[in-house]
Amino acid sequence: MSSPGPGLGPWRDADAQLAAASPAMAAAVAALGPCRLVRRRAPGGTFGALARAICYQQLAGAAAAAIHARFAALYGGCPTPAAVAATPAAALRGAGLSAAKAAALADLAARCLDGTVPAQGWSRLGDDEVVERLATVRGVGPWTAQMFLVFQLNRPDVWPTGDLGVRAGFARIHGLALPPPPRELAVLGEPYRPWRSVAAWYCWRAMEPPGVSSGGDPW
């Protein structure tokens, strides 16, 4: 696919700096085009985005989408922390959620209601503090927190070293025989500061089938 190269789009500075940091990444930017990473506006804001992430964990896309739709339908399509907190676990299980996910959604609702996970004000928190707050929620681990940083907050320098797509895409872009393990990938990503979120986006894009342009991300 041809590309106008770095210099266009909202991430033009990131594209240019990534291309300057590595010939391999320069080739990826040229082949895949300007970064089109966009901030997601999930229905229900922070709570809606994290509730969806919990519903989708460890499930294939179609099955996850069906369960999430049934969960949302319990609330007329727009679940809120207060409504979920008042929902019996049996009703959540009836929507197809596992016991662990039902408990995680209830805990997420409680953390939103007590302010641990705020609806607004994320811009005042650094990346580490965002991860720390989200990690208090049952069922929300580092990967989910990092995806929230990238796709909901558009933080520019998140490097999800445990993500299989990022590892595989990094290997493809850089001509490695095998995806690097997370600890090694942490070191290999250093040249791409302060734009590692954009580097991750290119890694996801590199793993897309030819002719597919889904946005190159798992969320």
Image (cartoon, rainbow, N blue to C red):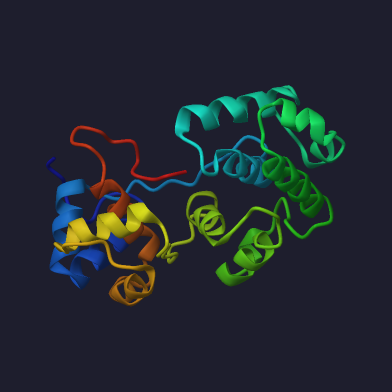
Where is residue 166 shown, x and y percent of the image? 34, 57
* Nearest to the observer: residue 104 or residue 190: 104
- Residue 197 is drawn in which quadrant? bottom left
Q: Residue furthest toward the right?
A: 86
In this rendering, is residue 110 above or below 194?
above
In the drawing, does residue 188 fall left or right of residue 81? left
In the drawing, does residue 41 fall left or right of residue 99? left
- Residue 122 is drawn in which quadrant? bottom right
Name the residue at 71% across, 29% down. Answer: 78
Where is residue 211 shown, x and y percent of the image? 19, 32
Name the residue at 23% across, 55% down. Answer: 7
Q: How many labels does the image show?
A: 0
In this rendering, is residue 68 above or below 216?
above
Name the residue at 47% across, 27% down. Answer: 62
In the drawing, does residue 185 fall left or right of residue 108? left
- Residue 193 is drawn in which quadrant? bottom left
Rendered-image quadrant of the N terminus: top left
In the drawing, does residue 30 fall left or right of residue 79? left
Where is residue 190 shown, x and y percent of the image? 33, 76
* Nearest to the observer: residue 16 or residue 203: 203
In this rendering, is residue 121 above or below 72?
below
Where is residue 196 shown, x and y percent of the image? 37, 65
